[in-house]
Image (cartoon, rainbow, N blue to C red):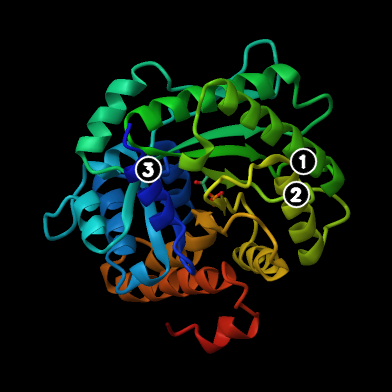
Amino acid sequence: MDHAMLAHTAATLMTAGKGLLAADESSATAEKRFKSIGVESTEANRRAYRNLLFSTPYIERFISGVILFDETIRQKTDGGVPFADYLAAKGIVPGIKVDRGAKDLALCPGEKVTEGLDGLRERLADYFELGARFAKWRAVIAIGRDVPTHACLEANAHALARYAALCQEASILPIIEPEVLLDGDHTIERCEEVTEMALRATYTALAMHRVSVEHTILKASMVVSGKDCARVAGVDEVAERTVRVLKRTVPAAQPGVVFLSGGQSDLDATAHLNAMAVMKGSPWPLSFSYSRALQNPALRIWKGRVDQVRSAQTAFYHRAHMNGLASEGKWHPGLETERADG
Ligand code: 13P
């Protein structure tokens, strides 16, 4: 375990004004996204799309790290350079999703536990060789009647801690992602309560498994109203509740917190991040690690067409730029149109 390397990776990822691009959609998720734009999800199309994102000119101004999928870390740019090497040469840290997906949790209807610990030590060694310097493991916590259960919170926290310990052993910085899902008609108060439980369980398990918090990054979900809740909380309320829960549960020693977008609109994801950054006073730097909220406009413009690559890159650059500004509390809605041409 190389502490200096882990600390350097964390500091690079949390560079002020930059955040992470999650481009680690599994083949099933990529299929869903491609279907929405009428493109067949073949290996060649997935490579071409990731090539579009990674080769966006000057994207390293706002993107400090990219999370790759197993298939993607083995693919190459149009010019034949492995994606991980290409990103590293741009000063962007390559990362890798190492979990094997959320599976139904036995005897707990409606709940999931993330799998992928078996053989993880060997896979991490392989990913390190391929250039990955950080990893991601996503646990999902649903909100519903009598859900989450203690069993679900414990099982997911335990898996996150085992994963994080293996990552640190391999000098790969673990991103800890306990995602509380947006789905449901629950209130924002209930989301706050569940997020607090999930984070508390996670940090208890990390301590139990001797994980060094200084060498991890938290990928958190924001505290928001359920997707079907009658009362949609405003931007300031989301920011206040999210930071409040994080302050209660996340040690100040954590080098940074990045957020997932989780199905929020692109602009909400940016506005919420900005509002949290404006509040100041958080003990950790805050930034983004979005997939959908960074990629949605680019995906819709691209539609698999070579002649649309440049416009799609402009749209991707714009979202990265807006979120980079938001991470420092420097965004306002007017910038969306002023700067839309990149
Ligand atoms: P979204 O921003 O689309 O939620 O994806 C982030 C992510 O990586 C979830 O694991």
Direction bottom: furthest residue: 338
Q: Are marks 2 and 1 in contact (CB under 8 Å)?
A: yes
Q: What residue is rendered at 27% in x and 65% in y? A: 55
Residue 340 spot, x, y in % from top left: 49, 83
Front-most of residues 315 and 67 = 67
Please identify, in this view, whether the residue under mark 3 or under mark 1 is nearer the observer.
3
Residue where numbered disc 1 is placed: 184
- The mark that comes first in sequence, 2 or 3, is 3
Q: Is residue 303 left or right of residue 280?
A: left
Amino acid beneath label 2:
Lys
Which quadrant is the C terminus positioned in?
A: bottom left
Residue where numbered disc 2 is placed: 227
Amino acid beneath label 3:
Leu
Front-most of residues 45 and 247 = 247
Q: Is residue 148 left or right of residue 114?
A: right
Secondary structure type for disc 2 = loop
Front-most of residues 248 and 70 = 248
Secondary structure type for disc 3 = helix
User: Where 68 sits versus 101, above or below?
Assistant: below
Q: Residues within 10 Å of mark 1 (few under 14, many from 20)?
A: some
Secondary structure type for disc 1 = loop
Q: How many marks?
A: 3
Direction top: furthest residue: 107
**Mark 2 and mark 3: span between their CA atoms?**
37 Å
Q: Residues within 10 Å of mark 2 (few under 14, many from 20)?
A: some
